[in-house]
Image (cartoon, rainbow, N blue to C red):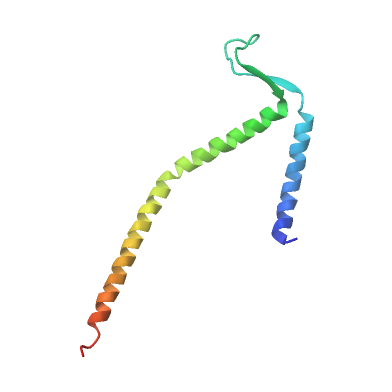
């Protein structure tokens, strides 16, 4: 077993234990209502174990945070693309100049 795999196991094993313990401790059913107007007779409600609500909230938070970070970094990706195009243009221009000066420096036979 490599050191990288051992460290990964050392980090992920306690996380997995915590997740399993959280799921076992919070398996009681709760009613998740999507109707803000009626508390007693909601139009849209589902009964699920509480740990599913917790995990769904965490997953949704990670997804929303990832999308927000990706959108916030858009200007940096755009600038990087522009700089890469500019560097490619300068590189090709330098190669062209090296090619023309190299031929001109050769003595004529």
Answer left or right for 25 relative to 70: right
Locate residue 65 relative to residue 20 in the image: left or right.
left
Could you tell me which residue is drawn at 72 percent across and 49 percent down? Answer: 11
Q: Quadrant of residue 88?
A: bottom left
* Residue 102 quadrant: bottom left
Residue 48 spot, x, y in % from top left: 70, 23
Q: Is residue 90 above or below residue 12?
A: below
Q: Is 91 rendered above or below residue 14?
A: below
Residue 36 coordinates in the image, percent (x, y): 58, 14
Q: Position of residue 24 (x, y in %)?
A: 79, 32
Residue located 73% across and 43% down the image: 15
Q: Residue at x 38, y 57 (%)?
A: 84
34 with respect to 99 (left or right): right
Q: Which residue is pictured at 31% across the width and 62% down the height?
A: 89
Q: Residue reaching furthest front?
A: 109
Left-right relation of 31 to 100? right
The answer to whether residue 98 is above or below residue 34 is below
Q: Residue furthest bottom?
A: 109
Q: Nearer the viewer, residue 79 or 109?
A: 109
- How many dots with numbers? 0
Q: Position of residue 47 (x, y in %)?
A: 69, 20
Image quarter of the C terminus:
bottom left
Q: Relative to 43, is 78 above or below? A: below
Indicate the quadrant containing the N terminus: top left, top right, bottom left or bottom right. bottom right
């Amino acid at each position: 077993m490599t050191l990288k795999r051992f460290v990964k196991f050392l980090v992920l094993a306690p996380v997995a234990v915590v997740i399993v313990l959280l799921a076992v401790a919070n398996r009681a059913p709760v009613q998740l209502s999507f109707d803000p107007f009626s508390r007693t007779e909601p139009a849209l409600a589902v009964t699920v174990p509480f740990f599913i609500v917790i995990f769904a909230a965490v997953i949704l938070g990670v997804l929303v945070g990832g999308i927000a970070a990706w959108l916030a970094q858009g200007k940096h990706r755009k600038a990087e693309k522009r700089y890469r195009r500019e560097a490619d243009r300068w590189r090709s221009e330098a190669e062209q100049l090296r090619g023309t000066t190299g031929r001109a420096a050769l003595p004529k036979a």
